[in-house]
Image (cartoon, grey):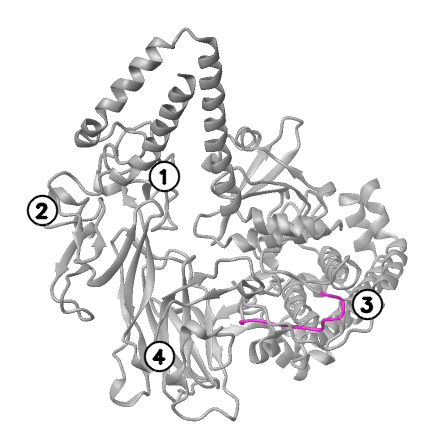
Amino acid sequence: MILKLVIHFFILVIWEVSAQDDLPVAKLGCNWQCGDVPIPFPFGMKSSECYAGKWFEIECRNPSRYNHYTHTPYLKWIGLEVTSIYVEEGLVNINNPIYRSNCGSKDSSQVNQSLEGSPFVYSQKHNKFVAAGCNSIAVLKLNGSDVSGCVSICDQNYKVGDIGKIELINSDCNGKSCCENSLPPYLKEYSTEIKGLKENETSDECSYAMVVQQYQYHGYRPFFYNNGRKRYYFPVYGLVKDLDVVPAVLEWEILNNLNLTLPLDHHSECCDTNVTSSQYKRSGQRCSCKSGSGNPYLDGGCPDDPPPPQYRKSRSPLTISIIKEVSISFGSIILLLILWRVLTATKKTIVDKYRKRMFKRNGGLLLQQRLSSGEVNVDKVKIFNLKELEKATDNFNTNRVVGKGGQATVYKGMLINGTIIAVKKFKVQGKIEEFINEFVILSQINHRNVVKLLGSCLETKIPLLVYEFIPNGNLFEYLHQQNEDFPMTWDIRLRIATEVAGALFYLHSAASQPIYHKDIKSTNILLDEKYRAKVADFGTSRMISSDVTHLTTVVQGTFGYLDPEYFQTSQFTEKSDVYSFGVVLVELLTGKRPITLTSSEEAKSLASYFILCVEQDCVFDIIDERVTKEGEKNHIMEVVNLANRCLELNGKRRPTMKEVTLELESIRKLEGKSNAQEKYNELVRSEDYQCWDDYSTILEIRSAFDLSSRTPTLEDIHIRTI
């Protein structure tokens, strides 16, 4: 009897799980399919009652350009072909046009896609900007400005016509005949341009440029990883010369101005989003089913809702039988114990599945792999729970936002013990690999001039990192928005330069494994309560083996700080960080921005201008007035010469960060004997910081040099930048 009831109970549980297959897709009386493509609400066709506003209207055209026997759905007001719609993820797969240049009769008109005013944007997470060509630069433009681009180079063995034979699905697009780069966030419109490598030169060979979808390989065999990193591919079948369109992904949200009444259902939840606009913290909403699947935009669209009448009718005898038998045996203690055990086990299974899904989505498997390999020092970091961080940040109140970028938002918070923290919340469309990469690298670093990682939280849909809070903003703001209460003196500039150099020397030579930062710039140098430098943002950094001399990657970085040699060769070395530091050093000397616009709106590089002034012996014409007043000329010239060496076009001629650190320390020691240093010491010097100002620091750095004694061998490591 008890066994029979238990079997019936499991049948009921299985029915509830399988019932989600019978959930509604579209509104009652509305067509829900065009050809082979399901059209879920808020999308719909024909009647305005079937969709949520004009932008979600689907036009079912006949025939398809690819299949003359079926209909094809299009976004009517945008004119793009739809291949699939994912309501839970807020995604639409489309066929996107490509741009051809110098391909003869197959030349295409300039691609100029626009989603302006719509609830759609091109997904930064699921798309890449891809170009195929020889010795050319492909540029993605937004309102006439360059927002992304990449360089493709061919060797001498390439023949005319070989580019058109490229198959994107089998190509890594690492810069040899095919290249790729990320899209900017909130991309609603774009145009493309292809030009030659030299300035004002156009490419005269057949080239292609496109925004295309990117898939991740799935599996556990080595094939799916490249040097420990997950591999990706483009789901494009056929030769590139035969293509007119490629698959791409749009993200969407329910815009605020649609006035759509979202279902109030305890099986679903809705939250504010800013998918389509960086100017508003809430531009729309998205909904999701708590069970993880279904259509939350429809009443009864999520699992566990009452089943449709026809489904309920077909099972009514079984239901009546179960009710009778449960009622008869209700007083049985054994039955209650069994049911309690089953319910407990079922609930635990559901919770465990949810946690595993969140853990996997947040890169937990990759992090677990790093933990088991010993790459992460778990003693230095804490695993925070979500309630703790929600309380610290007042439920991630927008008033607590202290920084916002393309991949994450930073909130200020305070723990129960009074510790002030900064919580970095990655966006849904952000790259999960950047979260894992930053967590692993910062957990290995222990240096006073590198921002300290306190821990992480993996219990949410979006991963969180927790850092020490750095109160005085970044160097760029401090340098270019002068603080009258605490002015940027010559001594402060020297000290900040020395601290950043020391941190980079530590990363390159004294850390447990060499680390290339890859994005040194003044906005990534934070200033604490005593205006001491803290190097931050390790999302694109790389930890390498001690016997490796460079990384070969798709070129990425910040214009104005990017190493020209890296741009030409796609090989990033420790000397590439030295070049970026040289630009920061010139910023400190001149007080000027790394990139400025001339009267003709052309970009002017501070590094190039500085080198020209050094060569023409007029460098003091661009040195900041405060520097010339407070610093001794011979000391300033020593820093000028050091910066000039850091900006050498040939990386081998640049000094190491070890040499840079020692030279700056030597200059600081000489400057420390002046009256300006004594005045500054009265203002900011404290007992816990005196050790940095005395000569023991040099001894500490020199002792660290012993850790860096190694003889590297050349070995190419090809890492596909995500």
Res. 240 mark: 4
Q: Which residue is mark 1?
A: 272
Asked whether disc 1 touches disc 4, contact meaning CB atoms under 8 Å apart, the reply is no
CB contact under 8 Å: marks 3 and 1: no
**Helix, strand or loop under label 3:** helix
Indicate which label's residue lies in the foreground, 4 or 2. 4
Say whether residue 713 is left or right of residue 301: right
Q: Quick check: 85 above or below 620? A: above
Q: Could you tell me residue 247's position as x and y percent? A: 32, 65
Callout 3: 10 Å neighbours few (<14), some, many (20+)?
some
- Quarter location, residue 170: bottom left
Looking at the image, is mark 3 or mark 2 nearer the viewer?
2
3D distance between C-alphas at marks 3 and 2: 74 Å
* The stretch drawn in magenta includes residue 550: yes
**Element type at marker 1?**
strand
Give the class, few, some or many, for how many residues have Cα within 10 Å of label 1's Cα (few <14, many ≥20): some
Measured from the top left, where is residue 673 in percent x and y? 87, 57
Q: What is the spatial separation of the Cα atoms under label 3 and label 1, in whole angstroms?
A: 52 Å
SS class of the residue under badge 4?
Answer: helix
Mark 4 or mark 3: whose residue is earlier in sequence: 4
Query: Considering only order in the chain, which callout, 2 or 3, is on the residue closer to the N terminus?
Result: 2
Which residue in the protein does label 2 denote?
47
- Residue type indicated by callout 1: Asp
Name the residue: 26% across, 24% down. Answer: 318
Say whether residue 297 is left or right of residue 638.
Answer: left
Q: Which mark is drawn over residue 663?
A: 3
Gap between marks 4 and 2, in whole Å? 39 Å
Q: CA distance from mark 1 to mark 4?
A: 40 Å
